[in-house]
Amino acid sequence: MPMLQIGRTEIPYELRRSATASERRITVTPGHVEVLALSIDDEEAVAGFLDRKRQWLFNTVREMERITANRHAVPRFLTGSKIPYRGRKMPLTVRRTDAERATVNYRSGFIVDLPHWAGLDADRLVASELKLWLRQRARRDVNEIAENYGRRFSLAPRSIRVGDFANGWGSCGEESNILINWELIFAPRRIQEYVVVHELAHIRERSHGERFWRLLGGMMPGYEAARDWLSQNESSLSSEFLDLGHPISARKRRK
């Protein structure tokens, strides 16, 4: 493995070349440094790039070591943390890069790449980026479910909005405007599906009478299991763990 000498410190790194990358990149994770070079780069080009980044790399590696050593002392959004997603606790990997902005990817777990300027507020930045990603994914899921069931059962909402709710998981107004709580992204997909279909059914049947439940059963056979799961687990579906500095409180919602 190649080694970069910075003063008396030796930093081993993995060199990877890419034919599709548009720029060089350094990624730092606990105990590992990856240098992404262009396929056309020769040794001199790589050495020059590393020389320009040496101070940033030195500081970032030291900061990663400090955070890792103290991770038991303060709850943080670090590599190895677990993030609730669709009914499961998925692993988080936090990486330091020399990029200008933070990015979130999902590949059997969450990967957050922090920009070079992230400092003491890195925890809040990770939490903010995760929350934004999860809200966007919830919006995409809800629209897909509504489009699928709406087409199959000829139910066309006037609008669909995914956002925050103080109480409840969803609603359907008199003008068929549907609102869905984005925090359903923490529940299994089937639960999210149940809430969306429940609100679609209200376009045709406004009350919770016998005809409504018969309609819902025809649209989503076996919905009772999802309804019962939500009733039993709804207090655990909260995004407050992403709001650093605020205590987590159990909130009861009904649907």
Image (tube, rainbow, N blue to C red):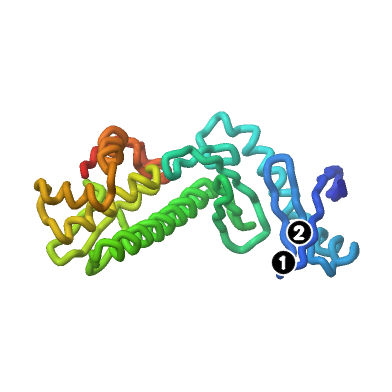
The residue at the far top in this view is 72
Quarter of the image for residue 141 reads: bottom left
Is residue 30 left or right of 214 when viewed as pictured?
right
The residue tagged 2 is: 36
Picture layout, residue 107 above or below residue 172? above
Q: Which residue is drawn at 16% across and 47% down?
A: 213
Percent position (x, y) of residue 54? Answer: 78, 55
Q: Earlier in the sequence, mark 2 or mark 1?
A: 1
The residue tagged 1 is: 21
User: Do the residues bearing badges 2 and 1 touch, measured as CB atoms within 8 Å?
Assistant: yes
Picture layout, residue 240 above or below residue 18? above
Q: Which residue is drawn at 42% across and 59% down?
A: 136
Is residue 167 left or right of 109 when viewed as pictured?
left
Q: In which quarter of the image is the C terminus?
A: top left
Tell me if I can see residue 110 in this picture. Answer: yes
Percent position (x, y) of residue 114? Answer: 60, 54
Q: Assess disc 2: are there few (<14), some (14-19) or many (≥20) residues with their C-alpha within 10 Å of its C-alpha.
A: some
Secondary structure at numbered mark 1: loop
Secondary structure at numbered mark 2: strand
Amino acid type of the residue that numbered disc 1 sits on in the rendered structure: Ala
The residue at the far right in this view is 43
Amino acid type of the residue that numbered disc 2 sits on in the rendered structure: Leu
Give whichever of 129, 179 is nearer the camera: 179
